[in-house]
Amino acid sequence: MQLTRRNFFKFMGATGASVAVLPSSAQAWQSKAPPDPYGCLVDLTRCNGCRKCEDACSTVNELPPPIKDVCDCTVFEKKRRPDENAFTVVNRYFSGKLDELDKPLPVFVKIQCMHCQDPACVSACIVGALTKKENGAVHYDVSKCIGCRYCMVACPFEIPAYEYHDPITPRVRKCTFCFDRISKDGGLPGCATICPVEAITFGKRNTLLELAKKRIKDNPGKYVDHVYGEKEVGGTSWLYVSSLPFSKLNFPQLPEKPSPKLSETIQHSLFSYLWSPILLFGLLGGIMYKSKKKNDNPQDKGGA
């Protein structure tokens, strides 16, 4: 058997099919989400765009101050994303409605790491630099990071940023959920502490879900009937309620299935038994050896 491109893909297809019939225990995927972590509920109907959360985040995480003063509304002229120097940003959208002064009614959206229940970035990290903690935070350990940036590719919210300007000790940067404050000091995230209109509520995730659903039920004309983050990619620690559909506020439309479920199922199916990789490479090696032996033998080619 000559190892042609066609034969190789036939073999790999058969190998893939064999993976599908491995015992169910090899394919079973289990969520690693903590049962009731901390989270934050962001009520977009309350946010007034003051950007004090940006300022507090910069102070707590020892980041450069916001690019423009919190009173400078020109910052809303361009949509921004969190980066290595800003872990949270606020953007402005217009609802299409007018306020009492006949001015366009804005909706402000705070963006940061969502701290997923089953984070794709954690699953993608090959050295364990990212871990999901019991308190809800997706924690980053810079001492383990090798700079592969797989987390940046895996994140469905496109949040992790990289310090490209630092060639010696670059880090992956994102919202920390003020990990030390909530785990050691029993405090609140900086953004939740400073919000003057209480648009950000910190607490246990299950309690926040109940609160969000109660607000929607009590004010059906004020909110859309959706808690963003309840089910998206398996659920997130940051939850949102809004007066506008989330698709109009640039929230990604994502499936309910956790992102790591498919990738980890395939990995576990292939490597749950020691003989799986050995058999795979052994068969490939055998085919290559047989192909080489046939090519080296003139009689096999019809020669005298």
Image (cartoon, grey):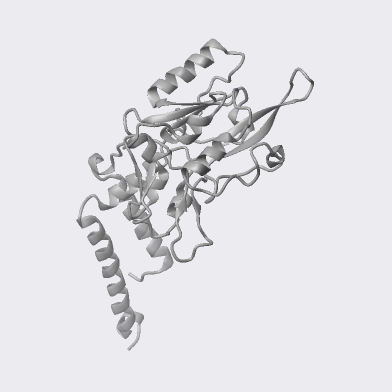
* Most foreground residue, 152 or 2: 152
* Most foreground residue, 199 or 11: 199
Asked if residue 274 lies left or right of residue 138, the reply is: left
In this rendering, the answer to whether 121 lies above or below 229 is below
Q: Which residue is drawn at 63% across and 47% down?
A: 67
In this rendering, the answer to whether 132 lies above or below 169 is above
Q: Residue at x 31, y 80 (%)?
A: 300
Q: Position of residue 137 (x, y in %)?
A: 38, 38
Q: Position of residue 207 (x, y in %)?
A: 40, 21
In this rendering, the answer to whether 137 lies above or below 241 is below
Q: Which residue lies furthest to the top in this view?
A: 218
Q: Which residue is drawn at 51% across and 40% down?
A: 57
Q: Residue at x 42, y 37 (%)?
A: 116
Residue 195 in view of the camera? yes
Q: In which quarter of the image is the C terminus?
A: bottom left
Q: Which residue lies furthest to the right in this view?
A: 102
Q: Where is residue 45 in the image (x, y as percent from the top left)?
A: 60, 23
Choose top left, top right, bottom left or bottom right for residue 295.
bottom left
Q: Position of residue 169 (x, y in %)?
A: 43, 62
Q: Quadrant of the N terminus?
A: bottom left
Residue 118 in view of the camera? no
